[in-house]
Image: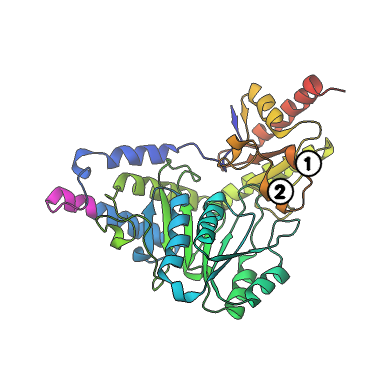
Amino acid sequence: MIYFDNSATTFVSKGVKARIIELTEDTLSANPGALHKLGNKANEVYESIRKETAALLGAKPDEIFFTSCATESANTAIKGYMSRNKRAGNAVISTRTEHKATLESLEYLSGLGYEIRYVKVGPDGKPLMESLEEELGKGGVALACFTLVNNETGSVLPFGDIAKKIKAESPSTVIYLDCVQALGKMHIDLSSLGAEMCSFSGHKIHSVKGNGVLYVRKGVRIDPLIVGGGQQDGMRSGTQSPVLAGAFLEALKEVSTGIDEGYDTVKEINLFLRKELISRGAEILSPEDALPYVLNVSFKGFESETMLHCLEIYDIFVSTVSACSAKQKKVSYVLLEMGVDRKTAANAVRLSFSRYNTLDEAEEFIRCVDEIYDQFLVK
């Protein structure tokens, strides 16, 4: 089997599985909120995990909150900030190439009367600075929402330039940054990054599904999305799970220790596939400077879903659009916003890699593509 769908989810690492088993021992399974010694022990483990997670991300422990996923983190950050800070402004700036978690949260705010301003993007998927400047110039921008690495194309946001522009034109504007596809693939230090709120997902870095992280810089106040017993400093009520938090931390530790080696491996795979696919008439839709973990390619003569199922015959797994939209069978809105024509976008397939993929797999992928064209393309 060749698994090139790591932007959708990753397989759980052996280290994470072992850590989960360890954290489900009876002596660690008490409610961290209980007053007895088992509860105290569970809480100590949980807070230790929180502290270590914060250190690896360059944050303070009280800036880190464990969630069920990045979608929850995005909803909490975007809705929570605007709800709590009504005097900050009535406008939010973003792009139409964001993840659905962001776009649907913005649509929700629009329904409440907030003004959502969308910055145009170029053919590389990056926001156009003149468009950003124009939207900032209208004033009243409370929040800006962007994605560090696009999950469909791998386009890397020039965040330093964007943050500098925002803070120069609108110093009070708070920035929310989706860091899901960047985690474990780029070095991230939240203390110097320049975003006040960030979201992360465990299952994109070889943890289990059901764990994410929300970063909220000290001093930034937001309303909680989930209310109840006031756990996690009132930010996210619900019984804390040392198991899920520990799974996230274990995956984070593993991916952080080999980040440069993993990048080099994936870059070699990406460059090989780009060269081989272009020579066969395919069109690469990911920009040249995209993060190498994602390669979006349009196959001439094959609609995306057809190619996906042809590859599946060979036990090769890829995706068409973001997994959150895949079952709707729509053409990628990200590619259309980048100016890709609909026919080309309709043939687009996303290959996404992890540090566990190999060049041998890439070579086998090309061999299978050649067989697919020989067998199935009507000439």
Confirm whether the magenta stretch covers residue 35: yes
Three-letter amino acid code of the residue under disc 1? Thr
Image-quadrant location for residue 3: top right
Residue named by callout 1 = 344
Image-quadrant location for residue 344: top right
Camera-side residue of 330 and 310: 330
Kindly identify the residue that appears in the image at 70 percent across and 43 percent down.
296
Three-letter amino acid code of the residue under disc 2? Leu
Kindly identify the residue that appears in the image at 55 percent across and 42 percent down.
324
Is residue 3 visible to the viewer in this orientation of the structure?
Answer: yes
For numbered disc 1, what is the local secondary structure? helix
Q: In the image, is residue 312 above or below residue 164?
A: above
Q: Which residues are magenta?
A: 33-43
> Residue 240: horizontal and vertical position, in percent?
28, 50
Q: How is the image coloured?
A: rainbow
Residue, far top: 375
Q: CA distance from mark 1 to mark 2?
A: 9 Å
